[in-house]
Amino acid sequence: MNKRFVLSVLFIGITTFVQNAYAETLHEAVQYTLETNPQVRAVQHNRLARTQEVEQAKAGYFPTLDFSAGIGRNEIFSPSEYEETSDPREVKFSLRQNIFNGFITVNEVNRQEERVKSARFQLQGTSESVALRVAEVYLNVLRHEVIHNLAKENLAIHERIFDQVKLRSESGVDEKANLDQVSGRLALAQSFMLVTETNIIDARTNYHAVVDYFPRDLVVPDHLVSALPDTLEEAQQNAVENHPILKSAQADLEARKAQYRVSQGAYSPVIDLEIDKTWEDNIDTNDWKNEIEAMVRFRFNLLNGGKDDARITETLHLVCEARAIRDNTHRQVVESIRLSWMAYQVAQKNISILKKYVESTGATAEAYTKQWNIGKRTMLDVLDTKAEFINAKKDLTDATYASLFAQCRILSGIGSLVHSLELEWPDDNNLKKDAKKNKESLKNNG
């Protein structure tokens, strides 16, 4: 055994001992990741930012009040007979209330509300994607642990046969060539063992990269299949109706339509109520001036170089773009759910076949071992059947976890993986703390 092999065995032993102290379910892994994942939190903050854009758009319904004050000095030098100096002062309040603007405010509020919907669905879609990625690395760790146990079983078989052949060779029953062949097979089994240990380390590293801590005695999920649709048609219908990314694309299309209506408001007149209250001293006369003025003002643009036409044409193309994105997303959702369903069906059929294969190869390996002991089979026959038996169990393991991951893909494809794990969408409890912390950081950094 080389140094790397010994260190790998030590690492696996230590981590296994630590993991046994606490078992972790897929529910817990996904829950923690959704609460802490930077990608999810970024989408959450984006959604909250868009809600403030709605409030900004609604401000168009309300009046504005401005205050201005000024003080200065005015010196008149010409004509010379009128030379004088004054200190003008002014205080002014201006109240503006829009009465009509071509429904720009209404449509802008609708646009921003659709953008908030899109961000909310985007958060759900991101959560589903992250949950699926957690499930992938979670199941991958479990799969490699099972394969590692098979490698240990395979190594134990080869070591036992090696000891038997060595004893028979030393006593003259077997030829030395048989011992050489078994030695080669033993080295191959040790290599397989080392590969599986490396794969476990890689799987745990990937788990840490996604969940942000190393796995601890993971538990195989066994309830996902109960949440699956009964047929492909039902799965496809659920995906089209419920997939959050498709809903987000539809909301984006509605937002673009509202944006188009906003741009059309440029062709309408603008009517405002304007009230000004002014106090002046030494502005036009040498006395105080106390004035209030109220007007309903009508404005209509007659020419602006074709800017409004270009803006309307631009938003029309943006509507077409959003519709094409929605249609493409629809195709991707349908394709994804069909591929996931087919993968699940194939895995299920493969499991049924491989179970029979494992049973038959196991029985054959046992029979060949008994026949070898009485001289009816060669040592290579025994090793071949043992290797086939281990490979059959490895293939069954791969198919089993492929089926579990396909179940997760289907649930994610219909937008219900998070809920099937009895979890809710991420909330905003920690986001205000984040915003406050970042505000303080911006202050401190100038």
Image (tube, rainbow, N blue to C red):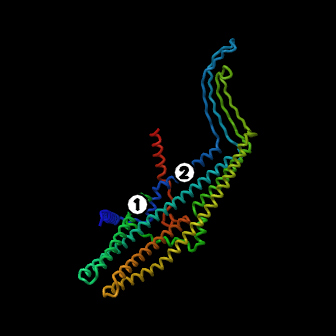
Residue 425 location in percent, x, y? 51, 59
Please, what is the three-letter code of the amino acid marked with disc 1?
Thr
Q: Which of 205 and 36 is in front in this view?
A: 205
Residue 143 location in percent, x, y? 42, 69
Q: Residue at x 59, y 63 (%)?
A: 332
Q: In which quarter of the image is the N terminus?
A: bottom left
Please, what is the three-letter code of the amino acid marked with disc 2?
Leu
Q: Nearer the viewer, residue 324 or 175?
A: 175
Which label lies toward us, 1 or 2?
1
Residue 318 vertical position relative to residue 275 in the rendered view, above or below: below
Label 1's element?
helix
Q: Nearer the viewer, residue 407 or 173?
A: 173
Tag 2 residue: 48
Label 2's element?
helix
**Upstream in sequence: badge 1 or badge 2:** 2
Question: Looking at this rendering, what residue extends furthest in the left direction?
Answer: 171
Residue 310 vertical position relative to residue 28 in the rendered view, above or below: above
Residue 226 visible in the picture: yes
Q: Which of 433 and 401 is in front in this view?
A: 401
Q: In which quarter of the image is residue 151?
A: bottom left
Mark sitting on residue 205:
1
Q: Which residue is drawn at 62% across and 44% down?
A: 59
**Circle 1: is it few (<14), some (14-19), or many (20+) Cα within 10 Å?**
some
Residue 208 location in percent, x, y? 41, 59
